[in-house]
Image (tube, rainbow, N blue to C red):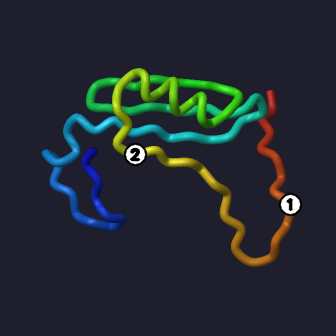
């Protein structure tokens, strides 16, 4: 697995063949998008472990990024996102 420290300058050739997974929580569990050079895949699962396992079955993952809300300042309950139709 290729790993670069946070903030490190990475030459484009060093990231070739990397496969990364971005993960976020949703109402039914977890959703993830895996990205590699020339391919995008979507995954959904009730548990994050199952989602990562399913994504890893499609090829090794160099990075897994999980969206975690940060709360700077006063701790307040996060309002849910809404979509109007």
Asked if residue 52 lies left or right of residue 5, the reply is: right
Q: Quadrant of residue 50?
A: top right
Please tell me whether mark 1 sits on a helix, a strand or a loop: loop
**Which of the marked residues, 2 or 1, is nearer the chain's N terminus?**
2
Asked if residue 17 lies left or right of residue 55, the reply is: left
Q: Residue at x 34, y 35 (%)?
A: 19
Nearest to the observer: residue 73 or residue 6: 6
* The C terminus - image quarter: top right
Give x and y (percent) for residue 3. Answer: 29, 53
Vertical placement of residue 80 versus 41, above or below: below
Asked if residue 8 lies left or right of residue 40, the reply is: left
Q: Residue at x 52, y 33 (%)?
A: 52
Q: Which residue is mark 1?
A: 77
Q: Counting other residues with Cα less than 10 Å from the Cα at mark 2, is it few (<14), some (14-19), or many (20 or more)?
A: some
* The N terminus - image quarter: top left
**Viewer-side label of 2, 1:** 2
Q: Quadrant of residue 61?
A: top left
Q: Residue at x 32, y 32 (%)?
A: 36
Q: Which mark is residue 63?
A: 2
Nearest to the observer: residue 85 or residue 77: 77
Give x and y (percent) for residue 7. Answer: 33, 67
Give x and y (percent) for residue 45. Answer: 65, 26
Please tell me whether mark 2 sits on a helix, a strand or a loop: strand
Vertical placement of residue 19 versus 1, above or below: above
Q: Residue at x 45, y 38 (%)?
A: 21
Asked if residue 66 lies left or right of residue 15, the reply is: right
Question: What's the CA distance linking mark 2 and mark 1?
Answer: 29 Å
Q: Counting other residues with Cα less than 10 Å from the Cα at mark 1, is it few (<14), some (14-19), or many (20 or more)?
A: few
């Amino acid at each position: 697995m290729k790993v670069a420290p946070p903030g490190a300058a990475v030459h484009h050739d060093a990231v070739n063949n990397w496969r990364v997974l971005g993960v976020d929580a949703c109402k039914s569990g977890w959703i993830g998008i895996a990205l590699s050079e020339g391919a995008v895949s979507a995954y959904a699962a009730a548990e994050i472990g199952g989602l990562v396992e399913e994504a890893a079955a499609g090829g090794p993952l160099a990075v897994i990024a999980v969206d975690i809300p940060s709360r700077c300042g006063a701790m307040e309950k996060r309002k849910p996102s809404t979509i109007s139709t």
